[in-house]
Amino acid sequence: MNQSDPTQTGSTQYVVRDPRTGQAVKSYPTATAADIASALDRASTAYADWGRRTSVAERAKLIGRVADLHEERQEELADLIVLEMGKPRDEALGEVGFCAAIYRYYADNAESFLADEPIDLLDGTGSALVRRSPVGVLLGIMPWNFPCYQVARFAGPNLVAGNTVVLKHAPQCPSSAKAIERIFVDAGLPQGAYVNIYATNEQVAEIIADPRVQGVSLTGSERAGAAVAEIAGRNLKKVVLELGGSDPFIVLGAGDLDATVQAAIDARVYNTGQACNAGKRIIVLDELYDDFVAALQTALAAAAVDSPLSSLAAADNLASQVDRAVAQGAELRTTGERDGAFFPAGVLLGVDPNNDVFHEELFGPVAMVFKVGSEEEAVRVANDTPFGLGSYVFTDDPEQAQRVADQLDVGMVFINGVNADGVELPFGGVKRSGFGRELGRYGIEEFVNKKLIRTIA
């Protein structure tokens, strides 16, 4: 996922800039040293009550109210998302609705997820159990491509578990960051339970090192993840990282070719192609390849991609990758011409392992398409990437689907479907896509103390 490194030195500007025009709309002052000290003080003080003195049921009730407020303020939040990063409005509304579902899921299930877990003792003497309890203050570092959703899947489970949250959002999403913080305040959470900060890059490193901070969750680029993990490692802090992805979309059978092509388009151009788990590498069996590519081009031309990328810089970066790929031998088939941050959908054909883009992530509505001669070659090409986030397998053979799924070096496999994420389904990857999981029961397990309590008599 392309995002600037939050630990680099240099100034950080929190500015809302309309990607359609490039014009600055509103700016926010970055935090002072006093602001950061106050944020950490408030989060640490709040933890003493929120994490140690409130029950899971009490916290769940307030997180349920957070879900309600996301629904009540859906239009307002969607407006901010559209303005800050150019997301199509219907998708922005869907994002906010999904956030509400995430908060409600954890509100509804927290008591069962966090219940004591008895252990059957081998010697039968006394009793033992594992008790899940919060660990303290957590730092969240969030990206721009899903301004509300990324926050929800971090904050929802961790707050209901009793941790407190200090949240550093992407510099281009300060208005969303402020609106989200207001929701937690209005929902009735105590002051300091959720604190938004407009931190500078240097301050992020200082926050991670602060002994009151017990863990860090980052969604962003490989470079950002490596930098944050390095600082956290020096300070013995746990990290959850959700980084880039170049997910394979494997076509081994297509009883309905048009439906499979449409699924490929949906997997590639959702959020204007700016999703870490988008289907970015389409791998097609040779006997289906020609028909598939022809149908894909026709469908792409009909699928109007009329929203901009998140910024002019994002479009510049994608253009540089595509131009370099073509210079190194790939063929670009595109639906139009670039106009500022508006980038036309397209496909790159003939990409081989010697082309730089073969092992890169394309963050925009451009897919690579590969022809393979067998199931074995499809798996090999799918795994020949530094990333290991998600994947998609399309086939009419159920046994083949499971066989291929077992061989993919990824954190998630979706068979014969796309955009099938759910609040109950764990999200995360392997290799350079990061580690740890969010959402589902696994999402609440990352930052809790699984404390053994053994009673002898």
Image: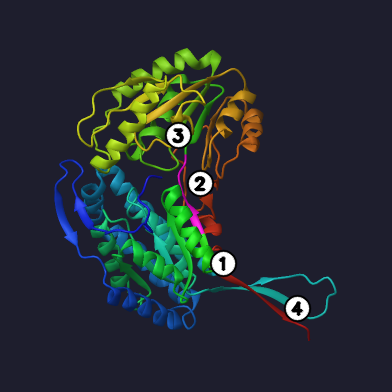
Picture quarter with the N terminus: top left
Identify the colour scheme used. Answer: rainbow
| Residue matched to label 3 | 279
Q: Earlier in the sequence, mark 1 or mark 4?
A: 1
Q: Secondary structure at mark 1?
A: helix
Residue at far bottom of view: 457
Labels 1 and 3: the sequence-earlier one:
1
Provide residue 372's location: percent of width, then percent of height. Answer: 56, 20
**Front of the two marks 2 and 4:** 2
At numbered mark 3, what does the secondary structure look like: helix, strand or loop? strand
The circle on residue 112 is: 1
Residue 384 lies within the magenta run:
no
Relative side of 283 to 306, left or right: right
Residue range highlighted in magenta:
240-245
* Residue at x-position 49% and y-position 16%: 289
- Residue assigned mark 4: 127
Q: Nearer the viewer, mark 1 or mark 4?
A: 4
Q: Nearer the viewer, residue 358 or 144?
A: 358
**Residue lying furthest right:** 123
**Mark 2 or mark 3: which comes first in sequence?**
3
Indicate yes or no whether the magenta region holds residue 244. yes
User: Which residue is outermost to the front?
Assistant: 9
Residue drawn at 26 percent across, 47 percent down: 85
Q: CA distance from mark 1 to mark 4?
A: 20 Å
The residue mark sitting in front, 1 or 3, is 3
| Residue type indicated by callout 1 | Ser
The amino acid sitting under disc 2 is: Ser
Residue at position x 55%, y 21% in the image = 253
Label 2: state its secondary structure: loop
The answer to the question of whether label 1 and label 2 lie on touching residues, with beta carbons closer than 8 A, is no
The residue at which mark 2 appears reads as 433
